[in-house]
Amino acid sequence: MAQRSGMVEKRGLSHWLVHLGMILGVVIIFFPIWLAFVASTVTQSDIISPPMPLWPGDQFFENYSKALVSGINAPVGRMLLNSTIMALGIALGKIVISILSAFAIVYFRFPGRKLFFWLIFLTLMLPVEVRIVPTYQVAANFGLLNSYSGLIFPLIASATATFLFRQFFMTVPDELAEAARVDGASAMRFFWDILLPMSRTNMAALFVILFIYGWNQYLWPLLITTDPEMNTIVMGIKQMFPSGDDFADWPVIMATSILAMLPPVIVVVGMQKLFIRGLVDSEK
Amino acid sequence: MEKRVTFKGWLLPLILLTPQIIVTAVFFFYPAGQAVWQSLFIPDPFGLRSQFVGLGNFEYLLGDPYYRASFVTTAVFSTLVTLVSMGMALWLALLADRLIKGSGVYRTLLIWPYAVAPAVAGVLWLFMFNTRVGVVSWYLGLLGYDWNHVLNGSEAMGLVVVASSWGRISYNFLFFLAGLQAIPRSVIEAAAIDGAHFWTRFRTIVFPLLSPTTFFLLVVNVVYAFFETFGVIHTITGGGPQQSTTTLVYKVFSDGFVSQDLGSSAAQSVILLVVVGALTIVQFKFIERRVHY
C-alpha cells in the first residue's frame, strides 16, 4: 500500500470527492444500525408517534436491563447464553471433527479412503435449508428438540472445514512427516507436536467464520426450539413481535437487535485480519 | 494430489474419521435420502399411512401456478440482490482503492453489516419501513408517497431485496477491493499517461481485469440469495403479500412446516437439490476449486 502513490492519485478537489463518496456510503450503510441504537435508548411513546428522534435518548439502561433481565417471552440474557453455546459448539465441533478426518484422509492409505473422501465432499453441496424437513424429523426422533445438541450437531454435518484442512495439509512439506517417522514418532505424536501447531492460524481464521455462521443461524433454531428458554437471540427477536394489532415493544426489540449483533461485530472488527483470511481461505 | 509420505495402519484413520462419518450419516445422508424417498409418497391426513405416487408430487408441483410463481420470484429476487449488492460494493471499492490513506478505517466500518445476521437485518429494515412507526415510510408519506409493503407486492419485494443486499455489501466490497489492489499500478498509469480518463480506464482496463472476481462474486451471491436470505424474508414479509416474496427455500419451509404437506415439501427439496447441484458444478467448473459455505 505504501508505494502506491503514483501519478493516478490526485490531490485537491477530487481527493476530497473520494472521501465524500466514501463517507456517504458509510452513512447509508450505517443508518439502519444507528436508527436501531437510537430506538433502543428512547421510550415507546417516542417511537409510536412518528417521526421518532434521530438522536439517542436517556432510556439506555432502562431498555437494556428490561431486555436482558425479563425480555418479552424469555430473558435476552438467557438467549445470549444459548447463542453463545450454539456458536461455540458449532465452531469448535466442526474444527475438531474436521481436522481429525482431514488428517486421516491426507496422511494415511486405507481401504475405502477414496469413498470417504467423496462422501464428505458430497456434503459440500447441500445447505441445511434443502433437507430441512427430514433433518427435523431425525432430530425429533432422537429427542433433540429444545436441546443444545439439537442446535449444534445437525449444523456441523458438512465438510467445508474438512476440505480446507485437507488443502492446508497438502501444502505441509513431506520432509516433516518423514523426519517424524525416521525419529520413530507415532502418527498421533506427529499430529499433536507438528501438524496442530502449524495449523493454528488456519484454525483461528476458520473459528471466526464459523462462530459468525453459528451465531447468525435462523431457520434451524426456529424449528428446533419451541421452548422460549431455549431460543437463540437471533431467532428470538421475531418471537417478540405481537401477533395481533398491538404495537410491538420497539425499544426492547431494538435493544435486543443491538445485543444480537454485538458479539459477531466484535469478533469481525476485533479479529479483522483473521476474519479476512478466513473469508478468503473458505472461498478457495 | 497425494502425499508421498504417509503413516501405516488402517484402524487409526478409521477411528479419526468416525466422528465426522457419524454426524454426516445421521444428519446429512439419512435426511437427504429421506427427502428423496418422501418425495415419492403422499401421506394421508393423519400421517398413518403413505401412498406411493411415483413422480406424482413432481408432476403436481410443476403444474402448480404457485410453485412456478415462486421460481420466477426467486429468479427476480436473486438477480436484484446480486446486482444491488455488487453494484454498491464495486462503487465503494473503487473509491477506497483511490485512497492512499484511511482506506483501513473505511474498511473497518464497512465490514460491520457482514456480522449482522440476515434475520436481524430484516428487523432493522422492517423498523425503518414499518407502516405505522417507520422513519423512512413516514418521510415518504410527507413526500406524498404512501408506502405499504404489507399490501403492495412490489414494495415488499423491494424491501426484502434491499435488506438482503445490505448485509452482503461488506463481503463483495472486501473481494472487489482485493481484486482492484491486485491490478498492477503500472498498467493504469500507462493508460493515464496516454490520456485515458477515469471512466475510460475503468471500462477498458480495470473492469476486464476484475472479471474473475466479478464472476466469482456473481455465483456466490446467487447462492447466497437462494439459501441464506430466509431470515430476511421470514422477519419482513413472511413470504407475502399473496406469496409475492415466497422464494423456493421459503416455500419448502412454509409447505413443510406450516401446511404440513410433507410429500410436496420433500419433492421441492429434491428439486432444490438439483438446482444446488447445478450451481455447484458451475462454481467448480468456472472458478476452479472455490468452496462456498
Image: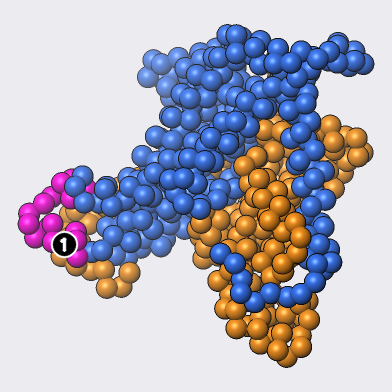
Chain colours: A orange, B blue
Residue segment shown in magenta: B186-202
Residue B237: percent from left, percent from top: 60, 22
**Image quadrant assignment for residue B103:** bottom left
Please say if B289 is above or below B131.
below
Query: Circle 1 is placed at which residue position?
Result: B189
Q: Which chain is disc 1 placed on? A: B
Three-letter amino acid code at the position of disc 1: Glu
Say few, some or many: other residues with alpha carbon within 10 Å of mark 1 (under 14 / 14 to 19 / 20 or more): some
Residue A262: percent from left, percent from top: 63, 52
Residue B260: percent from left, percent from top: 78, 18
Residue placed most toward the observer, B195 or A251: B195
Q: Residue at x 46, y 52 (%)?
A: B288
Residue placed most toward the observer, B137 or B67: B67
Name the chief secondary structure element in magenta.
helix
| Residue A282 belongs to the span the image colors magenta | no
The quadrant of the rendering that contains the N terminus of chain A is bottom left
Relative to A205, A147 lies left or right: right
Residue placed most toward the observer, B7 or A29: B7
| Residue B187 belongs to the span the image colors magenta | yes
Please say if B21 is above or below A165.
above
